[in-house]
Image: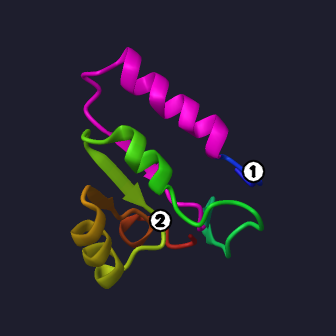
């Protein structure tokens, strides 16, 4: 979304979802290294992960996606819990 500081906006959103919809099955987040179909470097001043959302959503099911490979996915799942989603390596559109 190219926001310099998405923390206030998305912290509020996640906390409201958790409060108003406690039976919501999961929260699926795209890490900040993805912009559409392109992997990008971090945006200056923006957090380099969505861990602040993971903390808010706990103990609910949290799915992170974006720029993960097998090793980083295993490390993240082991260290932080939750699930890792993979999309781009498995889509049918080869132009992406």
Residue 37 appearing in the image: no
Q: Which mark is residue 20?
A: none
Q: Residue at left 66%, top 73%? A: 40
Q: Secondary structure at mark 1?
A: loop
Q: Which residue is mark 2?
A: 66
Q: Nearer the viewer, residue 8 or 87?
A: 8
User: In this image, 30 relative to 43: left or right?
Assistant: left
Q: Nearer the viewer, residue 11 or 29?
A: 11
Query: Magenta segment: does it hold 57?
Result: no
Q: Which residue is mark 1?
A: 3
Q: Residues within 10 Å of mark 2 (few under 14, many from 20)?
A: many
Q: Residue at left 63%, top 70%? A: 38
Q: Secondary structure at mark 2?
A: loop
Q: How many marks?
A: 2
Residue 68: x and y, percent?
40, 74
The residue range painted magenta reads 7-33
Query: Magenta segment: does it hold 24?
Result: yes
Q: Residue at left 50%, top 73%? A: 94
Residue 34: x and y, percent?
59, 64
Q: Residue at left 22%, top 71%? A: 78
User: In this image, 24 relative to 14: left or right?
Assistant: left
Residue 52: x and y, percent?
49, 50
């Amino acid at each position: 979304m190219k926001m310099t500081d998405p923390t206030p906006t998305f912290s509020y959103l996640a906390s409201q979802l958790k409060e108003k919809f406690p039976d919501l099955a999961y929260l699926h987040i795209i890490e900040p290294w993805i912009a559409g179909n392109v992997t990008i470097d971090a945006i200056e001043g923006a957090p380099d992960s969505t861990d602040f959302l993971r903390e808010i959503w706990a103990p609910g099911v949290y799915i992170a996606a974006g720029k993960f490979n097998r090793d980083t996915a295993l490390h993240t799942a082991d260290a932080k819990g939750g699930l890792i989603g993979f999309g781009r390596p498995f889509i049918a559109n080869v132009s992406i």
